Amino acid sequence: MKETANTILIVSPNNLRNGSDYILEEMACEAALRYKKIRVVYLKELNGIGWKNDLPANVEVNCLDAKSYLGGIFLLLKFLKNNFSSTPFYFVIASNIHLNSALGVAKWLGFLKTDGLVVRESTMIFHRFSSFQKNGVLAAILYWI
């Protein structure tokens, strides 16, 4: 990535301050001290509270106002293509399995330019789909390869 890539992108499903989304918000505030610009995108605003409060000036928040979660994934891809396809990011962070997949697809399609795609999801995801034992085992094997 070019030396000029001094921007970070953080993607979250919504603006609520709970669980991993709270950690993402804390990361955005900490990164704002070290990087020129932090872009935060969330799919849907809930209850009018959250990310837009108490953020440093170099943190820019965009809400896609998705009507549904699945619709938000498609809005995210369109948003990335229209707004960020020529913006190099130092790294991109998300902590939701569906957003992680969408960001991977966006990078593959060229809508997202970054060498550092940081996606995190607990390995507990294999337990969420325990009713699909064969798929859960296969997913776990593929994850660890």
Image: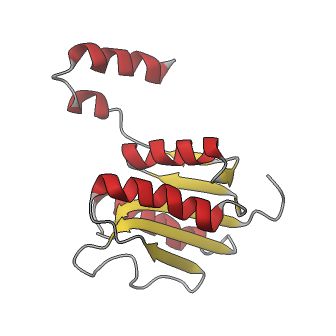
User: Seen in the image, is 28 located left or right of residue 48?
Assistant: right
The reply to whether residue 97 is in sight is yes
> Residue reaching furthest left?
131
Q: Looking at the picture, how far across and down is residue 6, in whole percent?
A: 73, 66
Please, which colouring scheme is shown?
secondary structure
Q: Residue at x 27, y 59 (%)?
A: 68
Q: Residue at x 69, y 58 (%)?
A: 90
Q: Looking at the picture, how far across and down is residue 138, in whole percent?
A: 36, 15
The reply to whether residue 20 is in sight is no
User: Seen in the image, is 108 located left or right of residue 69?
Assistant: right
Q: Note whether 110 is above or below 40 in the view shown.
A: above
User: Seen in the image, is 27 located left or right of residue 97?
Assistant: right
> Residue reaching furthest right?
3
Q: Looking at the picture, how far across and down is residue 75, in whole percent?
A: 43, 61
- In the image, 102 versus 8, the foreground residue is 102
Q: Residue at x 59, y 68 (%)?
A: 31
Q: Looking at the picture, how far across and down is residue 43, in whole percent?
A: 37, 64
User: Seen in the image, is 108 located left or right of residue 24?
Assistant: right
Q: Residue at x 29, y 20 (%)?
A: 136
Number of marks drawn: 0
